[in-house]
């Protein structure tokens, strides 16, 4: 983005200098009262502009403010202020002769893009405007038409600088928003990857099927197949069911080793937005995985209830429970049941008493 602003600033200055060169080649320097001073100043400004342009292109940014901008401003001011020494009063309102006018307008544009405060932009451009007005208007006090022209031209300095100031500020804010969005997308992808790995950890921890109890082996095999299908749907970009009943049955089916019962109290079918359904599925999966890891053998009830605005899913188990002050929340509690749900306007709460089981309540907007 900053390099685009560099290109605009350098391009405007180059265009103005080309105009001045055309002016000189077509004979406007012949109107000068001091051709040597006129040509010398134009050459000096051209060389300084070349150096400034190369410096900006190498830097690839107009920020931060640095000494070359001061040199450019002072040289522009000098070229404008000394116009009385090389241009006759009657010629100072002619752009082709008064080459310092368009060139120093580009200085005002650069000032608007470099300064971070509007006050500095107005002061700097105001100095150029006042200098131009003094050089052009003071010798022409008898001619109202020329005075009006000089005044209108002088307003261009703060006008161009102000437009450049607001334009560059808008572009920078737009670029910052885009950068923030890219960072957020990368963060979300990282969180999703961690969540998927978190979901897979219990299955990587399972014993070798050859050493499993014969009665548990079919349940474990079915559980692995269900988890594989869930992971496959993530890879294929299929976020799974958005119907709440199908979603609950799918997640409970992944945890076949649990003694789980489903209790639905939702009336007519409920369809959730895709992003909400995905976060709910992962939260419910995490809640059941915690039961599987810490309360194997417990009886589990998964219930769902709804109202016009919210859907509430509860996971109740009669396992050993735990003491919340002594339990350090892991990734599943803080991220999947925390920030991931909050991102879609949901929330979760966990209540547990040692010896009396655990209750997880997940609430998401409909």
Image (cartoon, grey):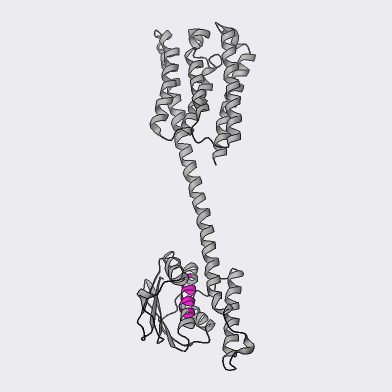
Q: Is residue 356 above or below residue 327?
A: below
Q: How many marks?
A: 0
Considering depth in this image, is 172 or 70 the residue closer to the camera?
Answer: 70
The residues colored magenta run 279-289
Quadrant where the image shows the C terminus: bottom left
Task: Check if residue 141 falls in the magenta segment.
Answer: no
* Quadrant of the rendered image containing residue 162: top left
- What is the residue that sits farthest to the bottom in this orientation? 215
Residue at 49% of width from left, 52% of height from top?
180
- Residue 23 lies, in percent from the top left, at 60, 16
* Quadrant of the rendered image containing residue 270: bottom left
Residue 252 vs residue 25: left or right? left
Considering depth in this image, is 313 or 65 the residue closer to the camera?
Answer: 65
Q: Is residue 146 above or below residue 362?
A: above
Specify whether residue 307 is in view.
no
- Residue 298 lies, in percent from the top left, at 44, 88
Residue 30 vs residue 355: left or right? right
């Amino acid at each position: 983005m900053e390099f685009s602003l560099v290109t605009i600033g350098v391009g405007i200055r180059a265009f103005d200098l080309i105009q001045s060169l055309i002016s000189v080649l077509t004979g406007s320097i012949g109107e000068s009262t001091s051709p040597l001073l006129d040509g010398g100043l134009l050459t000096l400004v051209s060389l300084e502009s070349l150096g400034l342009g190369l410096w900006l292109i190498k830097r690839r940014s107009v920020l931060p403010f640095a000494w070359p901008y001061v040199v450019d401003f002072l040289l522009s001011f000098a070229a404008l202020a000394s116009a009385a020494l090389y241009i006759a009063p009657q010629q100072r309102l002619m752009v082709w002769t008064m080459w310092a006018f368009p060139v120093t307008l580009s200085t005002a544009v650069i000032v608007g893009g470099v300064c971070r405060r509007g006050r500095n932009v107005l002061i700097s451009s105001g100095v150029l405007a006042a200098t131009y007005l003094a050089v052009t208007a003071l010798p022409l006090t008898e001619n109202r038409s020329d005075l009006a022209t000089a005044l209108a031209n002088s307003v261009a300095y703060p006008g161009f600088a102000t437009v450049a100031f607001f334009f560059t500020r808008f572009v920078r804010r737009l670029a910052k928003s885009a950068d923030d969005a890219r960072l957020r997308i990368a963060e979300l992808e990282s969180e999703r990857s961690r969540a998927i790995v978190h979901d897979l950890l219990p299955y990587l921890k399972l014993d070798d099927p050859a050493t499993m109890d014969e009665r548990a082996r079919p349940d474990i095999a079915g559980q692995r197949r269900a988890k594989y299908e869930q992971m496959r749907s993530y890879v294929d970009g299929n976020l799974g069911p958005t119907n709440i009943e199908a979603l609950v049955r799918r997640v409970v089916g992944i945890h076949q080793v649990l003694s789980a019962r489903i209790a639905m109290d939702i009336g007519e079918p409920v369809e959730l937005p895709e992003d909400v359904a995905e976060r709910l599925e992962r939260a419910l999966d995490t809640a059941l995985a915690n039961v599987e890891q810490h309360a194997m053998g417990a009886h589990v009830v998964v219930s769902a209830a709804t109202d016009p605005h919210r859907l509430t899913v509860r996971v109740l188990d009669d396992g050993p429970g735990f003491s919340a002050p002594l339990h350090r929340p892991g990734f599943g509690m803080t991220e999947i049941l925390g920030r991931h749900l909050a991102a879609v306007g949901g929330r979760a709460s966990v209540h547990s008493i040692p010896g009396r089981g655990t209750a997880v309540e997940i609430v998401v907007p409909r």
